[in-house]
Amino acid sequence: MELVCPAGTPAALRAAVEAGAHSIYCGFADETNARNFPGLNFSPKELAEGVAFAHKHGAHVLVAINTFPRAGDETLWHRNIAAAEAAGADAVILADMGLLAHAAKHHPNLRRHLSVQAAAANADVINFYAREFGVKRVVLPRVLTVAEIAAINKETPDVETEVFVFGGLCVMAEGRCSLSSYATGQSPNMNGVCSPAAQVEYVEEGDQLAARLGDFTIHRVGKDQPAPYPTLCKGCFTSGDQVGHIFEDAVSLNAQDILPQLAKAGVTALKIEGRQRSRSYVAQVVRSFRAAVDALAAGQPMPQGALAALSEGQATTTGAYAKTWR
């Protein structure tokens, strides 16, 4: 199976390629991609250089242009699709139907993948995207069981499927975070920012430290305790007589142990989340998963990687693949 790895910077791209990534996904340094954070992402020149480096080492580059443009303001998104093709990218990852139609009409030779932001979770809608826009691969949302993925693959023979196997989780419909939008006024789907840093504040309240996002307190911890980044869905809240992580635990997805089941289900590509992570993090995770993918291809047992230290909260979950719902 193809290993698709994140790169938030040119250095991370090189690290991922050298660690054994089959493909790299990245985005431009603007609001056209869903990881629009200061200090991250690529200029057109950096992308072209990154593509050349990846191709020299036998890897592919996929460019995420996966936010939704505002009505009447599509120029930047159109320009970036053209820039991705000019840089030699192997595919663009799109979510918006208008952008898919534009790419199919004006860049017919540029391979089109459907972003997880499109939340395509059944065979009918996947076949629609393939028929209408020539989509060759769909990144499945992180809400499906292995059995559901297998059923989708049986009904979508002309479309490859890509699934997330490591990194952050999202409890919303993949980036359509009403919580973050409500708290900050910035949409992850349109501005590319979930819990943006400009809205984050830490305030001392007596003997506690409060972590705030916008006008909302997300955590309170003792002064000698580490203060987590205030991401709304990972916040601690009170619900009835329960106090804790009501929406989602502060853990990372790790599906390494179920790679054989995903292969049997017909999955084409395995995606690692983490374009906002360091090149050291990227290199370690890619090496571990490349060893697992190679072992699986050779019919050998899954190696036990040392990924716990790289996981949020030092804990992992198999997410919806084997989810226990509250």
Image: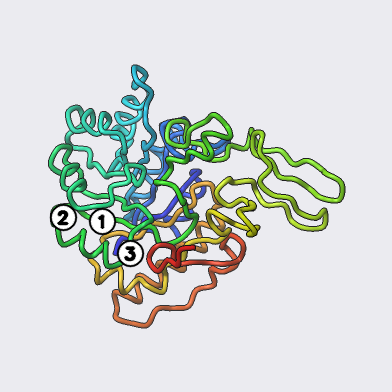
The residue wearing badge 1 is 161
Relative horizontal placement of residue 91, taking residue 236 as reference (left or right): left
Q: Which residue is mark 2?
A: 156
Q: CA distance from mark 2 to mark 1?
A: 9 Å
Q: Nearer the viewer, mark 2 or mark 1?
A: 2
Q: Amino acid at mark 3?
A: Thr
Q: CA distance from mark 1 to mark 3?
A: 14 Å
Q: Quadrant of the N terminus?
A: bottom left
Q: Secondary structure at mark 1?
A: strand
Give left or right: position of 13 versus 97. Answer: right
Residue lying at the far right in this picture: please name it.
206
Instruction: Tell me the SS state at disc 3.
Output: loop
Question: Given the current orientation, which residue lies at the most extreme top position?
Answer: 72
Residue 179, how many percent across, how many down?
Answer: 52, 40
Residue drawn at the location 26% of the way across and 63% of the way down: 148
Mark 2 or mark 1: name the one nearer the start of the chain: 2
Mark 2 residue element = loop
Query: What residue appears at the point 37 percent right and 50 percent down from the top-left corner?
Result: 54
- The reply to whether discs 2 and 1 touch (Cβ–Cβ < 8 Å) is yes
Q: Identify residue type, mark 1.
A: Thr
Nearer to me, 10 or 176: 176
